[in-house]
Amino acid sequence: MDIDKIQSFVTVCSTKNFTDAAEQLYTSQANISKHLKSIETELQCQLILRKGRQFDLTEAGEVFLVYAENIIRTYQQAINELNMVKTNEKVRLSFGTTASIGANILPKYLSNFKYTEPTTKLSMKIDQSQEILNLLNKGQIDFAILSHYITQGLNSYKYIPLIEDKLIVIVPPNHPLAKKESCKLSELNKETFLIKHSQASLNKYLAQELNHPPFLTENRLEVGSQNNIKHFVQNGLGISIVSTSLIREELKEGKIGIIEIEGLQLTRTINIVIPKNKKLFPTSINFVKYLTKNVRNL
């Protein structure tokens, strides 16, 4: 059984579609089907039950998928690390994070680290947390920096707490709530609430922590990004709950008001996330040590 056949099986399972899998692997559907048939013959069991253009995994298929994903992940990590050895890229620093963390928390620390280690080849991937985890699982980045409420694959990673990030209600500067130091949670229900999108990790976290308040679903406005949120709030289009790191300048300039929720203190832990079976190169180890020593609570 070769790696291409295993990759075909894993890709079909992830895309749920033979056509998409073939396009992603730059091959034909016939070749994908041939690979799957070859695996089933070698394993002497059926992995997939076809239903027209759709399919279901058999019990054997579900068991094999877990091991197949691990094989692909380990293989990709091996290739990446061998390439770094061959091209002398042990000074590479490759990690991923979300837009909010990457733009508002990390820049000054990256700048200082680059100054102390100027030969470092930096690659920072910015994307939604789910996509960052996908890159981590594929071995395309060495580690990730994510919020603690990203809980996928808890047993597969090592978590290093980095910083406690305070979350705060933000309102337009001329909003009635801006004149108060705190308010009841129920007072937010009549407001338009701004979020990135309904599946955003922060939105899910707030729903759980605040016990699904009406304002999160009944009168929300999806605006696509954290930066859009603060600009919309400045212009009186609604309120939101964001990291204090996002609004430092706006607070100094009086462009945004903040207010506490009575009896609640919302914080999130930002973690460095490293696959348990990942061996970091010296530059990554040094950067992780630098962050844990120098980053201060927000």
Image (tube, grey):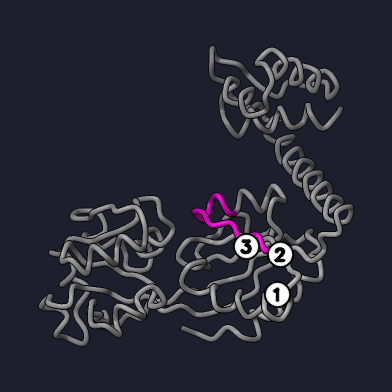
Q: Is the residue 22 above or below the residue 68 in the image?
A: above
Secondary element under disc 2, as helix, strand or loop, is strand
Secondary element under disc 3, as helix, strand or loop, is strand
Which mark is drawn over residue 93?
2
Secondary element under disc 1, as helix, strand or loop, is helix
Give neighbour class at mark 1: few <14, some 14-19, many 20+ (Cα, 10 Å).
Answer: some
Q: Residue furthest right?
A: 86
Nearest to N terminus: mark 2 or mark 1: 2
The span picked out in magenta is: 121-132
Which mark is drawn over residue 287?
1
Task: Tell me the mark number nearer the camera, choosing from 3 and 2.
Answer: 2
Is residue 130 magenta-colored? yes
Amino acid at pointer 2: Leu
Contact (Cβ within 8 Å) of mark 2 with mark 1: yes
Which mark is drawn over residue 214?
none
Nearest to N terminus: mark 3 or mark 2: 2
Q: CA distance from mark 3 to mark 2?
A: 11 Å
Q: Position of residue 156 (x, y in %)?
A: 69, 57
Q: Position of residue 191 (x, y in %)?
A: 15, 64
Taking depth in this image into account, of 98 and 151 the one nearest to the observer is 98
Residue at which label 3 appears: 144
Q: Position of residue 151 (x, y in %)?
A: 55, 59
Amino acid at pointer 3: Ala
